[in-house]
Amino acid sequence: MNPINIHILNRFGFGPKLEWLEHPDLKELLSDTAKLQHWIIETAPEYSESTKYFSEKLKHRVEKSTDQWRKNWEYAASRVDWIDTMVELDNPIREKAALFWNHHIPISVGIWPFAQTLLLDCYRKHALGNFGDLLKAISSTPCAMKFLNAYHSSKNSPNQNFPRELLEIFTLGIGNYNQKEINEIARAFTGRRTVIPDVWNLPYPYKMYIDENHFDASPKTIFNETGNWNGEDVIDIILKQKQTANHIAKSVLKFYLTENPSEKHIQETADFYYHHNYNFLDLINFLIRQPWFCSKELINTKVKTPIELWVQFQRQLELRPLTSETTNFITREFGQIPLHPKNVGGWPNGQAWLKGNKLSNRLFLPSVMIAISKTEKNHSEKSFGEKIKNHLINRNLLGYKFDHEISFNQNHFEETIEANQISTQNWLQITNNQTELSKLITHPSYQFN
């Protein structure tokens, strides 16, 4: 295997799948870099609504009628199915991009679970397209309007929560705007309203509209442009600011490449993104061909997010949970439930994932999964999630917490085979040897891509 190819697959997807070793065309992607670069872009899946797309890709799953967790928590199944689809797709480039945008624009579904699929499909539909289209779609969802109090805003009392996060987190970044811009943008976003149905009313009859009685129709000056601007006009004006491309470029490189990207690489990325109409698939095609993006110094240096860790683990080892509840349990214990950011700032980056009381689960849950898969030969009624809990309790891991900062230095682990650079032969040998496999995935190097 070519380490550069594994690096590319890790960054723009979730690594290769074990089954690829049995398919000559897919196996070639592990060694032929030019072919892989072309394949990733050309085979990017078209958008399809998640309710249809996920069910098509997850036909292998145990019959849903036997999955009691799905019956009890039907609304939450969509985020579990999203993660499971990441596992099954050969080329999950769209889902990885949607996961990035959920990091960069961290909107929570909060107590509106019925709107979860709507929000998820906003990320997925526009993940590889134009950033302006994505931002306009997200800002019009009931999740964003409720999460950031946008639907309370009126011309007599403009709410500044959404405008502030729009500038600070989504587009320009801290220090690149002033209070005047916040005030004017708040006026432009007044009057936005949505129908609020019963919480359990499915499917959600979504409709965002402008209440003209509460919209501020007077002129507004935003970044030296004056007019009777509304919310969509504001987004167009913000996209004209080169700083928007700079801010997103840094976020992209932190998520896809390394925790501390260089200013030179940020500027190169921003220049391309800005001059190519903020098109994300074009940006990926640009990055994938840059020598610095695939440099040896950056291979295996990015800390995996919890979802990346869990998805890659399943793809590499061909282990799958029996029920939806297990994936839900894993994401919670790892500290990253998709579409449920901890706050308006979203989730941490890089080494921050290796701090605090979730680290023990990151290190040991994979080995518990392997132990269960080796010892449980039948599909008993006892849920897989319950078995995991019992294993953790028996090993005293639930009470094993790290209350101090821990970080790993890659240079200390040369003697161990790294998960992303093992040969085909070693990969097959290790996946058939429980002891060696446990050593590999609980080793600190496995926390990195």
Image (cartoon, helix red, strand yellow):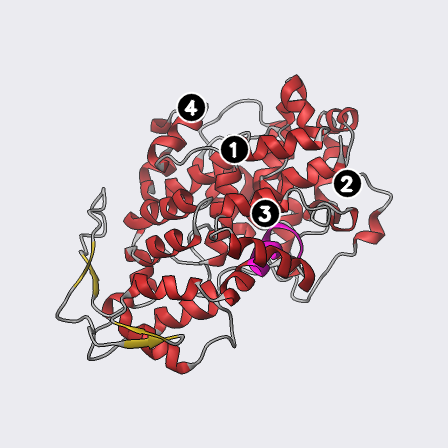
378 or 279: nearer the viewer: 279
Question: Is residue 35 at all visible to an observer of this figure?
Answer: yes
Q: Which segment is the magenta one?
A: 249-258
Q: Amino acid at mark 1?
A: Pro
The answer to whether mark 3 and mark 1 are in CB contact below 8 A is no
Q: In this image, 30 relative to 89: left or right?
A: right
- For the residues labelled 3 and 4, the Cα–Cα distance comes to 33 Å
- For the residues labelled 2 and 4, the Cα–Cα distance comes to 33 Å
Secondary structure mostly seen in magenta is helix
Task: Please give the residue where the numbered disc 4 appears in the rendered image.
Answer: 59
The answer to whether mark 2 and mark 1 are in CB contact below 8 A is no
> What is the crowding at mark 1: few (fewer than 14 residues within 10 Å), some, or many (at least 20)?
some
Q: Is residue 256 magenta?
A: yes
Disc number placed over residue 434 in the picture, else none: none
Q: Amino acid at mark 3?
A: Ile
Q: Amino acid at mark 4?
A: Lys
What percent of the width, then of the height, locates residue 86? 51, 36
Between disc 3 and disc 1, whose residue precedes? Answer: 1
- For the residues labelled 3 and 1, the Cα–Cα distance comes to 19 Å
Disc number placed over residue 418 in the picture, else none: 2
Disc number placed over residue 321 in the picture, else none: 1
Task: Please give the residue where the numbered disc 3 appears in the rendered image.
Answer: 393
What secondary structure is found at the residue carrying circle 1? Answer: loop
What percent of the width, then of the height, locates residue 91? 54, 32
| Residue drawn at (75%, 30%) of the image | 1
